[in-house]
Amino acid sequence: MAYRQVGMPVMTYKRLTPEQATEQLAERIAVAQDRIESAVAALQSGQQWRDYLALQSSLHAYSANNVWLLTTQHHDAWEKGVVSTPWPICVAGFQAWRRLGRSVDKGQRGYQILAPIRHRQRMAVDADGTSRPVGVKESVASDERVETREVIGGWRVEHCWDVAQTSGDPLPEPPHPSMLRGAAPAGLWDAISAQLQDRGYAVRLVPSADGLDGANGRVTWASRLVEVRADMDEAARCKSLLHELGHALLHDPELRSVSGVLGPAGRGAREVEAESVACIVADAHGLATDDYSFPYVSTWAGEDGIEVVRASASRVAAAAKEIITRSTVPHSAGGRATDLQLAIHPEQEQLSIAASPRRDRPLEPTSTRHIDFVLGLS
């Protein structure tokens, strides 16, 4: 079949077999995954990322008890007007702040925390793994081996300060996702919502991130509820809903994932998977999420970014394929019309849909002068 739009070349389509459509979709998903991996590699090779890791290595890891101590002391200082934030943001010792180019402001009192007093202790360990401390000159039995271990011999009080109590160089930060702007493809929100509802989830908009603990979206397993903040542009709302659909497919604790195995235990890996799914599916529908998804994935992947992305590839591909093939919204096999093309011929998508023959089998353009926008695969 062929048809002509005003000012456009004749486009000829050939029918794809189901096997060809499946193969083409798998290839497009693989290309998209390669783009994510390359973007993460580029972001994590930059100076901004190295500075951020240097900051993290300078900060202390605090126990739950010390977190409680820090929080209560900082909140007391805020109530007295000494600091500008009600809760601590980033806490380090005096010398650590100096190494980061910042100094503690005059009059700011350090917060007390408990620090362990560690020392090395010789231990005699028998064949069963039972251990006992031994002195430096003490001998051990013939069936025992000697190990030296670090043990806690007591506690001491140390002081640290929140960034709100310091001044100086700006703190290094990881790459920040940029919120998506503008409209989403027509019908995409309803199509994503329908897939979630088919899996037993209710979908609800909330006024702002305040109702989501600062997040753009959230899935609650116990109540089977997906929430997305309403004070974002339509494109951002749809991307966030796709992210939560990725979680529902891959990480629902009551269901096995689409790949037949349970999801990763760490939150970082789960966020990498969900956002990768959202990026690939959105891209297939003509919604570019690069400015948000790439920094998001990079940050959650951590120091081993490329390895984390690669480890999730098969699971991400399975979830993305399921969402795309079930989508009721026109989508491409991988490419999409550029902004310029749609600006010249904004009617392109509507005319293509109206002029298409039966869509029980996907179509592929054979003309070398066609716009890169292929319908089908749904």
Image: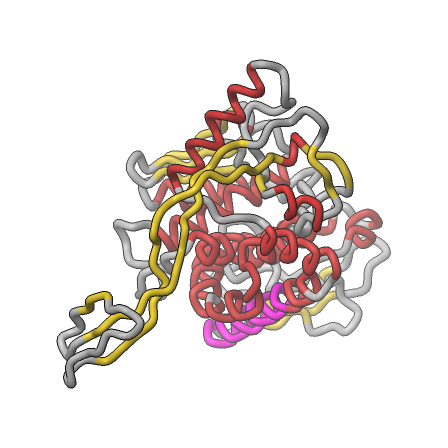
Between residues 135 and 237, which one lies in front from this camera angle?
135
Q: Find residue 94 and report its horizontal and vertical position in percent.
A: 63, 42
Query: Image point 76% across, 55% down: which residue?
Result: 338
Decide whether residue 32 is among the magenta residues: yes
> Furthest residue to the bottom?
142
Viewer-nearest residue: 254 or 269: 269
Residue 331 visible in image: no
Residue 175 visible from this viewpoint: yes
Total marks placed: 0
Say left or right for 260 vs 229. left
Residue lying farthest to the top in this orientation: 80
Name the residue rendered at 19%, 68% in the picture: 131
Residue 237: x and y, percent? 57, 37
Task: State the extent of the magenta-drawn residues as a range.
Answer: 18-37
Where is residue 75 shown, x and y percent of the image?
Answer: 52, 22
Is 10 displayed left or right of 13 in the figure? Answer: right
Q: Nearer the viewer, residue 263 or 286?
A: 263
